[in-house]
Amino acid sequence: MFRLYNILLLSLLISPVWAQQAINEVDGLTEKWLGLERQERRLLNEWQQQAPTMQQRIQLLQAEKAQLDDILAQGKANQGDVEQQREALLASQSDMESQQEKLTRSLATITARVNSLYSALPDPVRTLWDEEQSQLDDSTETSANLQVVLAKLSALHRFNQQLTVNETIITAPDEQDVLVKQFYLGAGYAWFTNASGRYQGTGEVIEGEWQWRFDESLTGDEIAKAIAIYEKRKEPGFVELPVSLSSATGGQ
C-alpha cells in the first residue's frame, strides 16, 4: 500500500492527467484486493466452521470403505471356500456313484447266484424265499435288494442248522394225492411218511433240483417215530433213519 502511494506521488510530479488516471486505477485495484481479502477471510471462516463436519464425514467414509473392503475380502475368501467345498462334494459324489455302480454290478452277480439255488431248495425254504422276493419290484433300490438277498441266505442258513417237520400233499406213483409229513435234516435231506404208513420215501437234491422219491423199502414206523419225538408226542429215543450215498456225496 505504501509502495502504491509512492508511485502515485511520483506520477503527480510527472503529469497531472496521467496521475489522475493512475490514482483511479490504484483505487480500483485496491478495492479489488480488499474484496479478494474479504472473500478469502469469508471462505476461511466457512471452512473452519465446516471442517469438523467434513472431517467427520471423511472418517465415516473411510470407515465404511474399510468395512466394504473387509466384506469384499471375506466374500472372496468365502467364495474360495465354497468353491473348494463344491469341488470336494462333486468328487465325493463321483466316487459314491462309482461305488454304487460297482455295488449294483456285484449285487446283480450275487443275486443271480443265490437265485440259482432256488430249484435245489426244500419247499419250506422256497416259501420263505418267495415271501422275501414279493417285497421287490422294478423300482426297488439297491439297498432293499441287498436286504432281500441277505434275508434269503439267512433263512437258508437257519433251516440248514436244524431239524424241521413240514406237512404237505405230494403225488404218489399211483397218482394219488397223499398228505404226508416231511422230516428235514437241514436243507439237504429229508424223509416223509403218511399217517397210515403206506407211503414213505426221501427227499434230496438230484442234478441241482430238490426231488421226492417214494421208497417201499423204508420203514414208515421209524420215520413216524422220529417225527413224533420231534413234535414231543413221544419220549426221546434212538431212531435209525437211512441216508442215501448220493446225498452224502452232494446229490450228484
Image: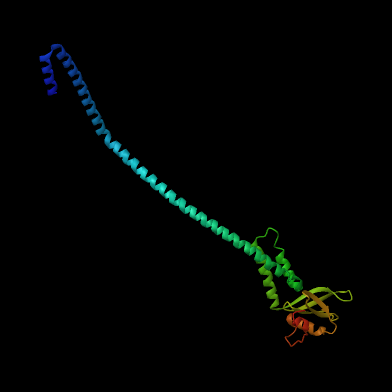
Q: Nearer the viewer, residue 61 or 31?
A: 31
Q: Is residue 219 left or right of residue 75?
A: right
Q: Is residue 58 left or right of residue 25?
A: right
Counting from the top left corner in percent of width and height, residue 157 is at: 68, 75
Q: Nearer the viewer, residue 27 or 132?
A: 27
Counting from the top left corner in percent of width and height, residue 112 is at: 71, 67
Q: Nearer the viewer, residue 15 or 6?
A: 15
> Which image quarter: residue 149?
bottom right
Q: Is residue 75 above or below residue 4?
A: below
Q: Is residue 134 above or below residue 245?
A: above
Determine the residue positioned at 20% across, 23% down: 33
Q: Nearer the viewer, residue 227 or 140?
A: 140
> Which image quarter: residue 21?
top left
Return the residue found at the far right: 174
Counting from the top left corner in percent of width and height, residue 65 is at: 37, 43
Is residue 4 at least partly visible in the picture? yes
If the image is split into quadrants, where does the C terminus sit? bottom right
Q: Is residue 141 left or right of residue 195?
A: left
Return the residue found at the far top: 17
Return the residue found at the far front: 14
Q: How is the image coloured?
A: rainbow
Determine the residue positioned at 82% across, 78% down: 213
If the image is split into quadrants, where does the N terminus sit? top left
Determine the residue positioned at 76% across, 71% down: 119
Counting from the top left corner in percent of width and height, residue 123 is at: 76, 72
Q: Is residue 208 above or below residue 52?
A: below
Return the residue found at the far bottom: 238
Q: How many marks?
A: 0
Is residue 143 at least partly visible in the picture? no
> Which image quarter: residue 41?
top left
